[in-house]
Image: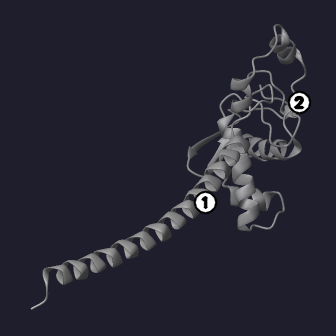
Amino acid sequence: MPSVMGLLEQREVAARRRVDGLREAADRIQAELAVAEREWQEWAIARSRVGEVLAPVDELGQGHAQAVGTAPAMGQAEETSSAPTAAKSKSQVPVWRAGLARSALSVDYQRILEVLADRSRLHQGPLTCQEMAAAFGMDVVPARVEALRSKAKRLVARGWLAEQQPGRFTLAQGVAGPGGGS
């Protein structure tokens, strides 16, 4: 029969092996956790940056993050609103209001409005982005159609177009005429 001390030593050795195995597993899990946390932080930063890029741009050309972070100087807002309303880059679309000319939009956006104005004058229904691509003489491929969809959705968000059915665009009520928005 084994001695009590021998049994205790066997159990101690078994417990020590178990502790060593668990420590190795814990170290491996800690390393995996560190890698996963770094990856998660990279994705969070990427998501934040994409959110900044895709944030709506107000009439002053500032994204939401810029507008919240800095307040305009006294009288600066009045100067900006009385200045001519021309878009500074292709992605900026001013919010539609009565009297705002289509020339405030970039050429791509003006083309979309012209095609839809022609359909409106002919009392034809709304257009899909595939139909717009064909009307512009573009290849009707997903990349071109999605680029048009993005522009059309931006025009809807700014009040230039209406989307009463998903994916089918018409001029918004009040946006008419060949040269202007009123």
User: Dot 2 corresponds to which residue?
Assistant: 86
Q: Secondary structure at mark 1?
A: helix
Q: Secondary structure at mark 2?
A: loop
The one nearer the camera, 165 or 156, is 156
Q: CA distance from mark 1 to mark 2?
A: 42 Å
Residue 80 location, quadrant: top right
Q: Amino acid at mark 2?
A: Ala
For label 1, the crowd category at 10 Å Cα-Cα, with few meaning under 14, some 14 to 19 and many 20 or more, is: few
Which x, y percent locates residue 86? 89, 30
Whether 162 is drawn above or below 101: the answer is: below
Q: Which mark is residue 50?
A: none
Whether 63 is drawn above or below 39: the answer is: above
Q: Amino acid at mark 1?
A: Glu
User: Dot 1 corresponds to which residue?
Assistant: 39
Q: Quadrant of the C terminus?
A: top right
Which x, y percent locates residue 108? 84, 47
With 15 as the anchor, is 179 left or right in this view?
right
